[in-house]
Image (cartoon, rainbow, N blue to C red):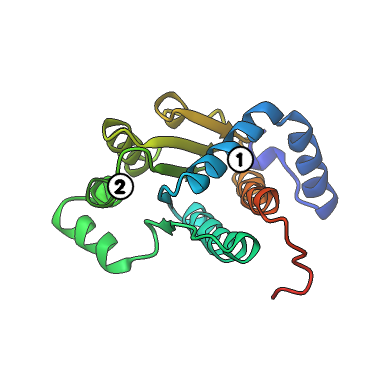
Amino acid sequence: MSYKDYEFSTRNYIHEHQKVLERLNEDSLQTAIRMVGRAFKAGKKIVTCGNGGSASTASHYITDWAKMINLATNEKFRGFSLVDNVGLITAYGNDLSYEDVFSGQCKALLDEGDLLIAVSGSGNSPNILNALRQANEMGVHTLGILGYDGGEAAKIAHHSFIVPSFDMQVCEDIHLMFGHMVMKTYCQLDIRGVV
């Protein structure tokens, strides 16, 4: 469906989410959630990256997981997002290229057995693809949280959870839901009173 064929209404937007949620591959979703849990329980670094709205989602994952999983388990959550250090992003972007802003950080910061989570609507952003390739070369586990048809990232990441929609906003909404599902899976804590 193209944008000019789609008439926005709140009802259409909600209905589109319902249709996409029914088409999700739940086995793929559960595998993705388990990958985060395995890395956390092994004390490995869990690192996220993305562009634009996906950068905000990548950062949001770490915000929720680091706080809530630590509160729930009293264990350290070794997570950070490659989008959160503006100095590093601009240094790599200026001195090398924007395509290297994440792969350069991967090379400098990740170790074998860590987990890189790449968030992308299209799965075709060059800096995301470079980060996945770099992480794979280093023996880092790679997980794509993707939309559309998964793009090239789905071919490179060790595992991908793909939201089967070509509507970027629907993909972004469900990508954020993935982060909340991870948090709720590993937080056996009554969070109603936690702000």
Please name the residue shown 39% across and 59% down the image: 83
> Label 1: how many residues lie within 10 Å, few (<14), some (14-19) or many (20+)?
many
Q: Quadrant of the C terminus?
A: bottom right
In the displayed structure image, the side of residue 74 where residue 76 appears, left or right: left
Location of residue 71 by image quarter: bottom right
Residue 155 location (% of width, % of height): 43, 24
Residue 178 tag number: none
Please tell me whether mark 2 sits on a helix, a strand or a loop: loop
Q: Residue at x 48, y 36 (%)?
A: 143
As drawn, which residue projects farthest toward the right? Answer: 11
* Upstream in sequence: badge 2 or badge 1: 1
Asked if one can make out residue 25 in the rendered structure from this viewpoint, the answer is: no
Query: What residue does disc 1 label?
Result: 33
Q: How many marks?
A: 2
Q: Quadrant of residue 136?
A: top left
Q: Is residue 136 left or right of residue 28?
A: left
Which amino acid, mark 1? Ile
The disc labelled 2 sits on which kind of residue?
Answer: Leu
Q: Residue 162: where, in percent of width, then height?
A: 59, 33
Question: In the rendered image of this protein, does residue 91 appear above or below residue 40?
Answer: below
| CA separation in Å, label 2 and label 1 | 20 Å
The residue carrying mark 2 is 110
